[in-house]
Image (cartoon, grey):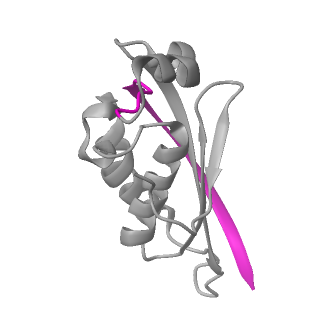
């Protein structure tokens, strides 16, 4: 029996949407106000969904302490109050929230082995949310 667990986490980060492979005019046209040279910030809400068999002994897919500890250490502490543009994670990629989802998914997929990572969902604003469920590498 496969079951799913989704946990929510919050962190704040800033970014500027700008691609060095495009002209300033193209960047302004594509990214609009998000291309502001000074950047802008978001209070992100991250949802991590994992799946697995329910252990008969514990009645759980995985220990919430393990999941929370991993996400806090490897995701929240890594991105919280950071300028995404200056992190190595985005040295070759525009730090859109789509790419942030992919990066978070990859961190979980590589390091969290207590359950299967199903998807990552990120709320950027009240109107914008993004999901990633694996299947491709971070784009350059």
Q: Which residues are magenta?
A: 1-20
Q: Is residue 95 magenta?
A: no
Quadrant showing the N terminus: bottom right
Main SS type for the magenta part? Answer: strand
Q: Position of residue 21 (x, y in %)?
A: 38, 36
Q: Position of residue 131 (x, y in %)?
A: 64, 50
Is 114 above or below relative to 27? below
Is 53 above or below relative to 84? below
For the image shown, how many numbered marks are present on the structure?
0
Is 100 above or below relative to 16? below
Q: Is residue 12 magenta?
A: yes
Residue at position x 64%, y 87% from top?
Answer: 56
The residue nearer to you, when weighing 68 against 116, is 116
Q: Position of residue 62 (x, y in %)?
A: 53, 73
The residue nearer to you, when weighing 97 against 121, is 97
**Residue 23 horizontal side relative to residue 87, left or right:** right
**Residue 103 horizontal side relative to residue 58, left or right:** left
The residue nearer to you, when weighing 140 against 86, is 140
Residue at position x 40%, y 32% from top?
Answer: 19
Residue at position x 37%, y 59% from top?
Answer: 70
Residue at position x 62%, y 79% from top?
Answer: 52
Is 56 above or below relative to 129? below
Q: Quadrant of residue 95?
A: top left
């Amino acid at each position: 029996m496969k079951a799913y667990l989704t946990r929510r986490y919050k962190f704040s980060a800033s970014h500027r949407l700008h691609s060095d492979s495009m002209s300033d005019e193209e960047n302004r046209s594509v990214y609009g106000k998000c291309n502001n040279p000074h950047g802008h910030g978001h209070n992100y809400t991250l949802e991590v969904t994992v799946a697995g068999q329910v252990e008969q002994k514990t009645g759980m897919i995985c220990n919430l302490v393990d999941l929370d500890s991993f996400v806090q250490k490897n995701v929240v502490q890594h991105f919280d109050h950071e300028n995404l543009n200056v992190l190595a994670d985005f040295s070759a990629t525009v730090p859109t929230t789509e790419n942030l989802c992919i990066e978070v998914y990859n961190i979980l997929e590589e390091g969290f082995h207590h359950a299967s990572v199903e998807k990552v969902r990120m709320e950027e604003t009240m109107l914008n949310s993004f999901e990633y469920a694996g299947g491709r590498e971070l784009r350059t």
